[in-house]
Amino acid sequence: MKFFWKIYFSFMILLLLAFGAFGTWMIHLVFEKSYQRVLGETERENQMFQLSFEMNLNALDEVYRNDGIIPVTAASIIQNFSDTGSTFRIYNKEQELLYENKPEIPFHDLLLSSLDSEMPCGYQLQKKGEKTYLLFACRSVIGNNTYYLENIRNISEIYQERELYYDWYTTIMLILAVIITVLVFIITHMLTRSIASLSHTTRRFTKGDYEVRALETGGDEIAELAQDFNDMADTISEKMDELTLQAKKQEDFTASFAHELKTPLTSIIGYADMLRTMECSQEEMLEAVNYIFHQGKRLESLSFKLLELIVSDKQTYDFRPLSIKQLVEESVKLTEIKRNEKGISIENICFDSYVTGERDLLISVFTNLLDNGRKAAAKGGCIRIRGKQYPGRYLLCIMDNGCGMEQEELSRITEAFYMVDKSRARKEGGAGLGMTLCSRILALHNVRWRIFSRPEKGTVVAMQFRTEEAVTE
C-alpha cells in the first residue's frame, strides 16, 4: 500500500473513531443526566407519598388502622399530588395489593422482597413491550403494621429521546464522513506531494537523468530528505564524472600505449625482415641494425616507465629524512652524459635542507625534469637549479631556456603519453610518461608544484616541500 493511502486511511479511521466515540459519550451523558433526574424526581415523589401516608395513619387511633382504611387514606393523599403520570401502589406486609390509583400492566415485582430494615428503599427497571418503567418502593413500619409504598413512572420518553439522538448523530456522522473524506484526501495529498515529487525525481535519477534534483521547499523532514538526496545525487554525479573521465583516460592510455608500441615494432620488424630477406651492403646493414637498436632502447625505456607507474601506485615506501641538496647533485650527475652531448650547461645553487621522502622516487623526479629540460633546450642551452629554505618549507625550481609550451598545453602535460612535440620527443627517445610519473611521485610526497612556461622562452617547474630541518650555507 502506498504511503499516501496509509496516511489517508489512518486519518479517516482516527477521525471517525474520535467523532464516533465523542458523540456516543455525549449522548450517553445526556441520557444519564435525564435518567438521574427522573430517578431523583421519582424518589422525592415516593418520599412525599410515604411521609403523607405515615402522618395520616399516625393521626388515626390504633383501632382504625386496618387494611380497609388504606385505600381511603391513599386516595385523599393522591388528590393533593400534582399529576406526574405516576402510578401509586400500597402493599401490606404479605405484599398483597391494597391500593392502586391507576390500572397498570401487572408487574412481576421482585423489588418488594429485597426491602428490609437495612435497605428500606430501592428501585428497579422493567420493560413491558416497547415501554420502560421505573419502579421505586419504600418499606414503611407504622405501629405493628408494615406497608410497602410503590410509585411507578413510565420513562420510555428518555429512551426514545436517546434513540432519536442516535438517529440524528448517525445522519450527522454520514454527512461528516463525506466531508472528512474530501478534506482528508486534500490534506493527505498536500502532505505527501513532496514525497511523491521526491519519489518521481528518484525514479528519473535511476533511469539515467543525473542532472535532475529534488525541490527543497519548507523546513520539515521531507525538505531535509530532499536536501540529503540532492547532496547524494551531487556526490554520485561527481563520482560518475570522475569514473567517466578515468575510463576516458584509461581508453586514451590504452590507445596511446598501443600506438607507442606499434611505431617502433613496425620499424624493428621492417628492418629485421629486410636484413632477413635481402642482400644489404655493409652501410645499409649498419643503418638497419642501428635503427633496430634505438627503437629497442625506446621500447625498453617505455617498459621501465610503465613499470615505475604501476609500482608507484601499489608499493608501500619507507619515508625518511633526506638531504635535498645531495638528491639534486646525484640527479645532475646521472643526466650529465646526455647533457654534454648537446653542450647544455647547468647552474646549481641549492641551499641544503632535509625533506621526508623516498630516495629513489625523488631522484626519478629530478632526473626526469632535468632530462625534459635537456630535451627542450637547444644546443648550448642552459638549465638552472635554484633551491631555498623558508620557514617550514623548501622551494626548489628547475628552469630551462628551451622551446617552452603554450598555456593550454600545461593542463595536459601530466597525461600519460601526451607529448607537446611528438616528433622531437620520439627523436629524443621519449614516450610521454615522464611527467605522469613525476606527478604521481610528487603527490605521494604531498609536494605542491606548478609549471610555468612561455613559448620560445623556456619552462620553470617549481616544487614546494615540507622540511624536517634546514642547513643553510
Image (spheres, rainbow, N blue to C red):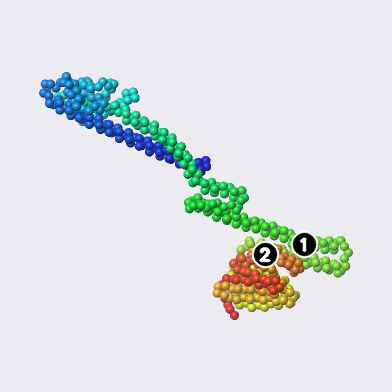
Picture residue at 58% right of the left edge, 47% below the top? 203
| Residue 144 visible in this rendered orientation of the protein | yes
Q: Give the vertical position of 51 relative to 184 (above or below).
A: above
Q: Residues within 10 Å of mark 2 (few under 14, many from 20)?
A: some
| Residue 335 visible in this rendered orientation of the protein | no
Q: Give the vertical position of 99 relative to 40 (above or below).
A: above
Q: Give me the disc on residue 263.
A: 1
Q: Give the vertical position of 10 relative to 153 (above or below).
A: below
Towards the viewer: 238 or 183: 183
Query: Quadrant location of residue 402?
Result: bottom right
Q: Are marks 1 and 2 in contact (CB under 8 Å)?
A: no
Q: Residues within 10 Å of mark 1 (few under 14, many from 20)?
A: few
Residue 379 at x, y = what percent? 74, 75
Quarter holding the C terminus is bottom right
Q: Earlier in the sequence, mark 1 or mark 2?
A: 1
Query: Quadrant location of residue 130?
Result: top left
Q: Amino acid at mark 1?
A: Thr
* Element assignment for label 1: helix
* Element assignment for label 2: loop
Q: Is residue 65 left or right of residue 252?
A: left
Picture residue at 59% right of the left edge, 73% below the top? 394
To which residue does mark 2 refer?
412
**Disc number lying in front (1 or 2):** 2
Query: Quadrant location of residue 58?
Result: top left
Picture residue at 57% right of the left edge, 72% below the top? 393
Residue 275 at x, y = what percent? 85, 63
Q: Amino acid at mark 2?
A: Arg
